[in-house]
Amino acid sequence: MNNHRGAAAILEPALCAVLGVRELPIRLAVWDGSAVGPLDAPRVVLRSRRALRRLLWAPGEIGLGRAYVSGDLDIDGDVFATLDALDSTPRLGSDDEPRLPWRQRARLLATAARLGAIGPNPKPPAEEVTLTGRQHGQHRDRWAVSHHYDVGNEFYRLVLGPTMLYSCAYFEAGVVDLDAAQLAKLDLIATKLDLAPGQRLLDVGCGWGSMAIHAAQEYGVNVVGITLSHEQAELASKRAAEAGLTDQVEIRIQDYRDVEDAPYDAISSIGMAEHVGSANMHRYVRQMYDLLKPGGRFLNQAIAWSRGETRWNNDTFIARYVFPDGELLSLGETVSALENGGLEVIGVQALRPHYAKTLRAWVDRLDQSWAEAVRLTSEGRARVWLLYMAGSALSFENGTLGVNQVLAIRQPTDSDR
């Protein structure tokens, strides 16, 4: 079929309207074999009219995400190049204008009708979730955590590797291997917390137990690790037992709000504060304060929003498919929360470039083991992880997102002496 008379050419003006661009930054191929756009640009494939119908019902990020996760839309080639092309293209109008005015919606509707794509709203992929109940209530938090983390330990092992660490690594000078960088991150945290034999460490959001096991083995501390994920807790306990650390490492399925066995000499929270919610930060910090002994140290490692005022929206791809109810604070908001909760901030280290490297390594591992990842979960789940990790890597590279380790101390007061 002549490309200029095919569905791609008919669709091109409407798709430009959806993306807010004058010219397509991608090569668009569609279900009838036609294609438009620069020949040397990243290639995106609409495999059926259903992909267009998803965009018609949800123009923008949600519709594109649904189409990709369901397989109605494919990225043919380098996912980083494709996302970068879509993100870096100058948009029409100002940031204050609606992304898709009603006039453009009508244009998309007319185009869909011309291409025979009008129809009911397709059912969202099974991987999409909408939570109910009180936001950041304990029941809903458990559900949110389970959605993200209880997708199979073996799937995570494919992506994360033997360290089973699901947070930003620390690539010291000369370090290029992800596993070595992850262990370097654990040592960096242990050093900042000034861990010593016989101390008690609480690891909040302990994941699969890597920090707990490392601290017990290498620094001789007694560790309590808490998580809301049953699959994480099961594997973390098994790993601790296999390492001969059952007397030093205890793994609990427990909410941070329910920990009562103070005091602790140190507390680590690595990639967990993103699940707390801005409205609960004061309670989170106060709980850390109450659990620490006077002079005890608290290290909080968290992703930060780095572009102006914090904005978080539950109607996004990340919120629907990856981290439901997740919220990012700016570095300033985190520091203020710690100080307002009685903790003294004594150190801040930004690790933004390190997370971009970490995410690219995870994407590479997922890509190399794609067939096995699909077998262990689903093709839709593998697509979600690929898209979110690649997009996140680019956000860390361009500075939209940051990640910081903030070290704080509970200073002794007169009543403590």
Image (cartoon, rainbow, N blue to C red):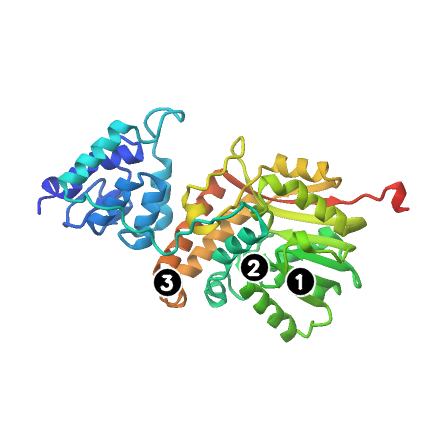
Q: Residue at x 46, y 39 (%)?
A: 313
Which of pointers 3 and 1 lies earlier in the amino acid sequence? Answer: 1
Residue 357 visible? The answer is yes
Label 1 amino acid?
Answer: Ala
Left or right: residue 3 versus residue 76 is left
Mark pair 3, 2: CA separation: 22 Å
**Residue at the extreme front:** 133
Which of pointers 3 and 2 lies earlier in the amino acid sequence? Answer: 2
Secondary structure beneath label 3: loop
Secondary structure beneath label 2: loop
Which mark's residue is nearer the viewer, 3 or 1? 3
Q: Residue at x 37, y 42 (%)?
A: 84
Label 3 amino acid?
Answer: Ser
Mark pair 3, 1: CA separation: 31 Å
What residue did someone put label 2 on? 165
Density class for disc 1 (Cα within 10 Å; few <14, some 14-19, many ≥20) is many
Q: Residue at x 23, y 46 (%)?
A: 120
Mark pair 1, 2: CA separation: 11 Å
Residue 183 higher or lower than 247, as above or below: above
Disc number for residue 378: 3
> In the rendered structure, are the residues bearing label 3 and label 2 in contact, judged by CB atoms less than 8 Å apart?
no
> In the rendered structure, are the residues bearing label 1 and label 2 in contact, judged by CB atoms less than 8 Å apart?
no
Q: In the figure, residue 369 lies in which quadrant?
A: bottom left
Residue 163 visible? The answer is no
What residue did someone put label 1 on? 212
The image position of residue 119, as x and y in percent, is 20, 45
Label 2 amino acid?
Answer: Leu
Q: Residue at x 20, y 37 (%)?
A: 12
Residue 68 versus residue 141: which sits nearer the camera?
Answer: 141
The image position of residue 221, as x and y in percent, is 75, 63
Residue 313 versus residue 345: which sits nearer the camera?
Answer: 313
